[in-house]
Each structure stands twice: as structure tokens, then as C-alpha cells.
Amino acid sequence: MTKQYKTLGEFIIENQDSFKYSSGELSRLLNGLRLAAKVVNHEVNKAGLVDILGEAGDQNIQGENQQKLDVLANEKFIQTLKKREIVCGIASEEEDDFISINSFDNQHQNKYVVLIDPLDGSSNIDVNVSVGTIFSIYRRVTPVGTPVTIEDFLQPGVNQIAAGYIIYGTSTMLVYTTGDGVNGFTLNPALGTFYLSHPNMSFPENGNIYSVNEGNYVHFPQGVKDYIKYCQKEEDDRPYTSRYIGSLVSDFHRNMIKGGIYMYPKSSVASEGKLRLLYECNPMAFIAEQANGLASDGKNRIMEVKPTELHQRVPFFCGSRNMVEKAEEFMKNANA
Ligand SMILES: O=P(O)(O)OC[C@H]1O[C@](O)(COP(=O)(O)O)[C@@H](O)[C@@H]1O
Ligand SMILES: [Mg+2]
Ligand SMILES: [Mg+2]
């Protein structure tokens, strides 16, 4: 490796002071996520050779059949975060309820809650298509010294202090923000180290990629149908290109680099869409906004939605600023 890249560890330390609560705790938390990411990456890379493909045999609270890798990734991230002596609670797509974690002195001294989607893009695990992990971090709102409560998790996205994702793709990357821009780090598997390969990531204001499961077209609201027709129309810089991997992290990552919009609208078969506000939409919205993009439910800023339930779903429109605004315009016009 001729060009000298900064390591993730160095970057975390160097940028510690730009963080509001800079006491080294967030650095330790991010380092915990970095460690768990490497463990899960190792398992994902050899998934076909060991017995971790296929279904685990149980369903999660959303009624989805858990994949073995969903369960494994969930265990690895929870185990690693529990040991960090910083986290007072974890919520996960694969856990019915939040997990309360006491500090080693049993005095509930830990200050951060973490919400995770341990394995994003589960339908792609068995077919060797890129998948990811998504995380969102908040400072607790209940007093230190008391057990964590649901209140600490049901915070609006604007309260996030950090968010990010890991993408297990052609290369493995960790992309995150602490509210001071978005940076991407690529894992050098030979050295087991993440390096700063994508500094200051940013969505192009315009793009020519739209990502939506068009198989649901008949069920979409009129405004969404109109916007998809607009994307497909031969006019100006259109038709746009349709790209849909079926892993939110991967579709988002591509669109952030190339310019594009990802949509998972509500529909006649899914009244609030599919994606979960707390551990999919809020963290991706924080990253999108920090990367000059936008994220809404078709009308409202995702990060201002007041959560009411741990696993609630919201319609999601996210990506290049001008494309999200255009989609919102079509929905407004169609009174969708
Ligand atoms: O197959 P569909 O309905 O298009 O849904 C695909 C979407 O669902 C998800 O797989 C949901 O995430 P999980 O895999 O974590 O449940 C997203 O990653 C993806 O964008
Ligand atoms: Mg997901
Ligand atoms: Mg998942």
C-alpha cells in the first residue's frame, strides 16, 4: 500500500475533541463497533463454507424469519458492546425488547444507548449479494444512576450523537458520522485494519439513479407512481437508471457515491412501508443529511419524527437533495 492512509483508530482519536461530549467514551464505543464489524465480516466472508446460511428457525417480533447470520451478527454486536462499560442499553431489530445493561459497579453509570440492525439486507445473505449492519447512538435522557428506560430509545433522530453502517461488499467498509461530516473507511483484510479511504463523503445534489422495488408498483400511492414515471420519461437528463440491490445499506452507499434516490414508500399492502424508523431510517437519515442529502417520509424530515414504538416503520425517501425534493413534490401534487 504505497499511499499512506490514516487508520480508523487514529481518525477516531484525532477527532475526539470535535465531539460534544468528548471524554473518550464515544471513541471506545466506536472502537467496539469496529471490532464487532471485523468479527461479523469474517463470518460473512466464509458464509458458504460454514453452517451459517439459511434460516435460524425463529421469527423476530416483526414476523420475519430470522436468518442464521441475523442471529449471529446480533449476538456478536451485543456481546462486544456489553463489554465496553459505556452502553446502558441496546435495541436491535432481532430483539423483541430493549436490553438494559448495568455498569460493572452496578450503579447504572453508563451513558449511551445503541440501536442496531445487525444484518441489513437479510434476503441477500444466501445469494452472495452485499449486506450490511446499521447503528445509531444516543446519549441517555434518563438520569445516570438509574436503569435505562424506553424513553432513552424513543428519541427523535435529531438527538443522535453518531450513526453509521458497515457494508460487507466487494470490500468491507465502515461509514459513520458524529455530526461533523461523513467519512468512509475500508478494511484491509490482510492487516485487519480500517483505513480512511473515503473522506468527506457527499451526495451529488442531482443523480440519475432511482432505487425502489418496482414489483410493488401496483400498490404504491399515486404520487410515487407519478414520480417513477417521471424518472422513466425520455426528457432532459432522463430516463434515469433503475438500480435496486435489495439491501438498504448497499443501495444507499451506491447512491451516495454516484447520486440517486432510494425509496421504500407506504403502499396498499404496507401502510407504513417496511423500514424501521429507529435502527434503519434515523441513522441513514443522519448520514444522508451530513452528506448534503435529504431523508423524509415523503413529507416530513425523518429525523423530526417523534418515535412511539421500538420497531415502528416509516415510509422512506432518501438521497440526492434535488431528487428527494422532486419526489416530495409529486406526492404533494397527488395528495398522496
Ligand atoms: O425485498 P423488499 O421488500 O424490496 O425489501 C428490501 C429492503 O428490506 C431490507 O432488507 C430490510 O432490512 P433487513 O434485511 O434488515 O430486515 C432492506 O435492507 C431492503 O432495502
Ligand atoms: Mg435492515
Ligand atoms: Mg436486519
Image (cartoon, rainbow, N blue to C red):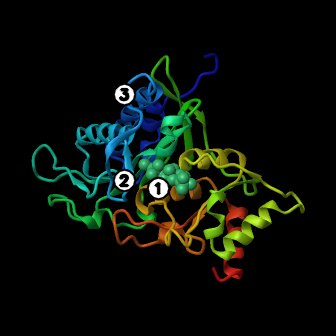
Q: In this view, does 123 lie to the left or right of 79?
A: right
- Residue 224: horizontal and vertical position, in percent? 67, 70
User: In the rendered structure, which amino acid carries the disc numbered 3?
Assistant: Asp
One can see residue 39 in this view:
yes
Q: Residues within 10 Å of mark 1 (few under 14, many from 20)?
A: many
- Residue 296: horizontal and vertical position, in percent? 57, 67
Residue at 80% from the left image edge and 60% from the top image edge: 232
Q: Do the residues labelled 1 and 3 touch (CB within 8 Å)?
A: no
**Ligand 2 under 8 Å from disc 1 Cβ:** yes
- Residue 158: horizontal and vertical position, in percent? 46, 65
**Ligand 3 under 8 Å from disc 2 Cβ:** yes
Q: Quadrant of the C terminus?
A: bottom right
Q: Distance between the residues labelled 1 and 3?
A: 27 Å
Mark 3 lies on residue:
51
Q: In this view, does 133 lie to the left or right of 230?
A: left
Tally the marks: 3
Q: Quadrant of residue 156?
A: bottom left
User: In the rendered structure, which amino acid carries the disc numbered 2?
Assistant: Glu
Pointer 1 or 3: first along the chain: 3
Which element type, helix, strand or loop, lies under badge 2?
A: loop
Which residue is most to the left? 106
Q: Nearer the viewer, mark 3 or mark 2?
A: 3
Q: Distance between the residues labelled 3 and 2?
A: 22 Å
Residue 280 is tagged as 1
Nearest to the observer: residue 260 or residue 52: 52
Mark 2 lies on residue:
93
User: In the rendered structure, which amino acid carries the disc numbered 1?
Assistant: Glu
